[in-house]
Amino acid sequence: MISNTIDNRLAEATAKWLKGYYFTRFAFSAIWVAVAFTVAKNAAPLAAVMLIAYPVWDALANFVDAQRSGGIAHNKSQLLNFIVSIITAIAVGVALDDSMNSVLFVFGVWAGFAGIFQLATAVGRWKSYGAQWAMALSGAQSALAGIFMVKMAHGPAPVGIANVAPYAAFGAFYFLVSAIWLTVSEARKVTPRAAH
């Protein structure tokens, strides 16, 4: 009985953390996309910084989330996501010296791996926390977007940060959906208690 109470409290605390985490990730991605589509597409130095910063942010976000959700050792998919994102940030820095096509290729490969790891994280959390269907969809779409970006990177059309922005925009959308879903779910749990 005590064990169940403790488990329930831990689950509630983690769900609350996830809600704030999803809102934060939405806000960062939304701002990133807005700047990418406006100022950064005509400012190469800013675009370069943003392209490196995006996977760095993803790495840090995954690391902190894993630590708050049972520890990095118990969240292997997020540990892998953290490692791949750090490698990606370094690879983007190297690719920037070559061409934007190379950068887009790196982002495409990263999106594929990150999507698979995000899908795995969502599946692992499915029974314990709400809104994981949105995270699962986001992971699957990220993997597909990765394939699309790799193809685009090998195409003849010129590419830039604006070609990465739609990927980040879809991520922002799914984080917002997840945050709202958890908020609504939390409100539904509180309402019956208030009625008593």
Image (cartoon, rainbow, N blue to C red):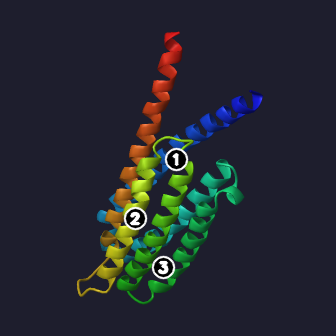
The percent position of residue 6, horizontal first and vertical second, equals 72, 33
- How far apart are the two marked residues, 1 and 3, measured between alpha carbons? 33 Å
Name the residue: 38% across, 87% down: 99
Q: Name the residue under label 3.
A: 92
Using a 10 Å C-alpha cutoff, classify the residue at mark 2 as few (fewer than 14 neighbours), some (14 to 19) or many (20 or more).
many
- How far apart are the two marked residues, 2 and 3, measured between alpha carbons? 18 Å
Secondary structure of residue under mark 2: helix
Q: Which of marks 2 and 3 is in front?
A: 2
Q: Quadrant of residue 104?
A: bottom left
Name the residue: 45% across, 42% down: 179
Q: What residue type is labelled 2?
A: Ser
Horizontal relation, residue 77 to residue 119: left or right: right
Q: Which amino acid does label 1 sit on?
A: Trp
Residues 155 and 120: in front is: 120
The disc, 2 or 3, on the residue closer to the chain's N-terminal end is 3
Residue 41 visible? The answer is yes
Secondary structure of residue under mark 1: loop
The disc, 1 or 2, on the residue closer to the chain's N-terminal end is 1
Disc on res. 142: 2
Is there a contact, CB below 8 Å, between mark 2 and mark 3? no
The disc, 1 or 3, on the residue closer to the chain's N-terminal end is 3
The percent position of residue 25, horizontal first and vertical second, equals 48, 52
Disc on res. 56: none
Name the residue: 39% across, 54% down: 172
The percent position of residue 48, horizontal first and vertical second, equals 43, 75
Q: Mark 1 points at which residue?
A: 126
Residue 31 visible? The answer is no
Residues 188 and 25: in front is: 188
Q: Nearer the viewer, mark 1 or mark 2?
A: 1
- Residue most extreme to the top: 196
Question: Which quadrant holds the N terminus?
Answer: top right
Residues 62 and 12: in front is: 12
